[in-house]
Image (cartoon, rainbow, N blue to C red):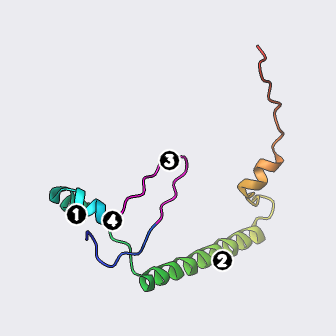
Amino acid sequence: MLFPNQPELTLVSNECECLLLNKSSFLHLASDQYKQSIRRSEIPFPNDSVFYKTYHTNELWKCFSKQVYIDAYERLNQKHPQNIKRPMNINEQKRHQPQQPILIGAS
């Protein structure tokens, strides 16, 4: 195998054709040179415990950084309330923009 003990994997790509290959068929058909190239250039997937630890650490960081942003915004707003506008969520911006009519077949 290219990387031993790898989990089953399904890739979903937006608007892309995907091929499903059986691992054993791929290993049988791929040249040794190509397999060595893949081993050098690709990173194997982490095992479940490493994945969940990394995911948990990332989620903690996102919560912490969001709280730091909120705290900084509130402190700045207390000092200069008229100068700071709260940024809108991207989805809110889209809702507030006027819709342009779409004309089909108009010259």
- Disc nearest the viewer among 4 and 2: 4
Q: Earlier in the sequence, mark 4 or mark 3?
A: 3
Q: In the picture, which quadrant includes the N terminus? A: bottom left
What is the quadrant of residue 51 in the picture? bottom left
Judge from the rendering whether residue 68 lies leftward or rightward of residue 34; answer left or right.
right
Q: Which contiguous range is marked in magenta? A: 10-23
Q: Name the kind of residue labelled 3 in the image.
A: Cys
Q: Which mark lies nearer to you, 4 or 3?
A: 4
Q: Nearer the viewer, residue 71 or 77?
A: 71
Q: Position of residue 9 (x, y in %)?
A: 44, 68
At x 76%, y 50%, the residue is 93
* Magenta stretch, overall SS: loop
- Residue indicated by mark 3: 16
Q: Residues within 10 Å of mark 3 (few under 14, many from 20)?
A: few
The mark nearer the N terminus, 2 or 1, is 1
Q: Nearer the viewer, residue 90 or 48?
A: 48
Q: From what the image shows, is residue 104 above or below residue 2?
A: above
Judged by depth in the image, the label closer to the viewer, 3 or 2, is 3
Instruction: From the image, tell me which residue sits under label 2.
Output: 67
- The CA span between labels 1 and 3 is 25 Å
Estimate how packed mark 2 is, as few (under 14), some (14 to 19) or many (20 or more) residues with alpha carbons within 10 Å: few
Q: CA distance from mark 2 to mark 1?
A: 40 Å
Q: CA distance from mark 3 to mark 2?
A: 37 Å
Residue drawn at (33%, 79%), measured in percent from left and top?
5
Give the mark, 4 or 2, whose residue is nearer the N terminus: 4
68 displayed left or right of 48 = right
In the drawing, what numbered circle is on residue 40?
1
* Residue on which disc 4 sits: 23
Question: How far is disc 4 from disc 1 in space, using C-alphas?
Answer: 18 Å
Q: Residue at x 25, y 63 (%)?
A: 27
Tell me whether circle 2 and circle 1 mark residues in contact (CB < 8 Å): no
